[in-house]
Image (tube, grey):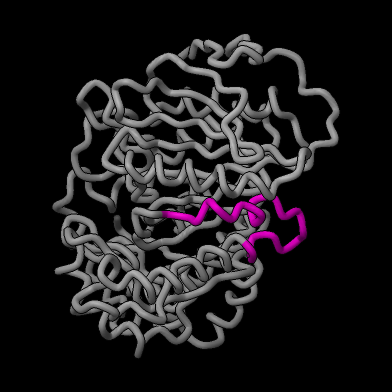
Amino acid sequence: MAISFAACGSDDTPDPGPGPGPEPPVTTNERTVLVYMAADNNLHNFAEYDLNEMKEGSKALNDNQNLIVYVDNNNTKTVPCFVRVKDGQFIDSTTVSESSTANPAVLEEALRYARTKYPAKSYGLVLWGHSTGWLMRNDTIPYLRSRAYGLDSNNNTSIWMNIPSMARAIKNGMNGEKLAFIHGDCCNFGTVEVAYELRNVTDYVIGSPAEIPDEGADYSNLSCFFDTSSTFYEKIIDDYWDFYINEFKTKIYRYYLQDYGDLAGYSVPLMAVKTSELDNLAVATAKLLNTIPDKLNPTGTLDFSNVIFYAVGNGLKHNYDMYKTLKENTAEADFNEWKPAFEKAVPYYRLSPRWFVSKSTLTTFIKYMLSFDTISSDCHVLSMFFPGTQYNNIYPSWNSTIQKLQWNGPISWQQYGW
């Protein structure tokens, strides 16, 4: 899908549009970060809020740091556009023909635009919007039940982008160059299946396997996205974590579960995955699972009683904590052999045993979440899907769709009867 560009400001040079074109020139720019805002949905008011935060945060950026935003919201008077946010202002604005942010071709062109117009030594991508992680349907079709990223309400239909298509779009848009990070400022992004799917297009995947508040990240503090130290992902997580520690304490009438103030002292579960370690983790996980085949088949009895789950869909619990589930269900010696592979792949995480959830999932969550404090020991935030007969009645069954993900290559759920 081609995207046409038109300059908005008098000092803009219109982008020539799609096509491979020449390689970006050698540059002294440190990093370009693209915030991809899929706001053509019920988050549009938060998009305006976050854009204003970005103006404030951009005042601390230097000339070698490029913050580029592609935004598409559901205001019919506003067409999708690119802007650079610099020194508290929107500059170099370029409008784009109406299109769907859930279309992988649009993401591809957005990355190509950022990379060619604002070349840098490294690149980051922030995915702003709705997500349910690896759950998938056919690409860009009307919303039914299972979906991945985006929720674009273009032309009165709701469409989504699956993670495999996202990975291909990123690879093409970056011309094969890896991103330094992908930060999912969206729900349910912190799953091993998502990270594995994106392992060849980014060095790190950062996000939460749980719901995040509609407010999302604090974009008035942008320094974490431009930190080029070897542990930059810690700053992204810490800034996010600290922001919601404060929000849950001070905005008790906005963020709570049952009673005002009951989230004080809590935040959002967050983790970072080092993608270069994921193939080793996959091999180690496949080997560990092979020690418990009787627990993994359709009549098996995996024990989740002491494991935090991070998501609810169709009224069913999923996104169970990977580390704790495997520890609870395998022999100690086998688990300890697997453990180093996980620790290398997940170099940093911060667990909150409670977090803010929407009203639509609160009823299912609340009776369990109140006990999460007591079972949170050894939960390490990265989640993993384990097939179960309870998912058979979802259409299409998650037990089948999980097998479309690359993670299923080494894991091979079908060998256990799924």
The spot of residue 213 in percent (x, y) is: 35, 59
Q: Main secondary structure of the magenta part?
A: loop
| Bounds of the magenta segment | 216-235
The answer to whether residue 83 shows anywhere in this view is yes
Q: Quadrant of residue 42?
A: top left
Quarter of the figure with the N terminus: top left
Is residue 225 part of the magenta span, yes or no? yes
The spot of residue 244 in percent (x, y) is: 44, 68
Q: Quadrant of residue 362?
A: bottom left
Residue visible at 32% across and 20% down?
77
Q: Is residue 237 above or below residue 58?
A: below
Residue visible at 77% across and 23% down?
24
- Residue situated in front as seen by the camera: 257 or 400: 257
Q: Extreme bottom residue here?
A: 374
The answer to whether residue 402 shows anywhere in this view is no
Quarter of the figure with the C terminus: bottom left
Q: Is residue 200 above or below residue 189?
A: above
Q: Please state if 222 lies on the left or on the right of 122 as rendered.
A: left
- Residue situated in front as seen by the camera: 358 or 283: 358
Residue visible at 64% across and 75% down?
340
Is residue 415 part of the magenta span, yes or no? no
The spot of residue 106 in percent (x, y) is: 47, 24
Q: Is residue 193 above or below residue 105?
A: below
Q: Quadrant of residue 129?
A: top left
The spot of residue 25 in percent (x, y) is: 82, 23
Residue visible at 18% across and 79% down?
367
Q: Please state if 369 lies on the left or on the right of 78 as rendered.
A: left
- Residue situated in front as seen by the camera: 345 or 34: 34
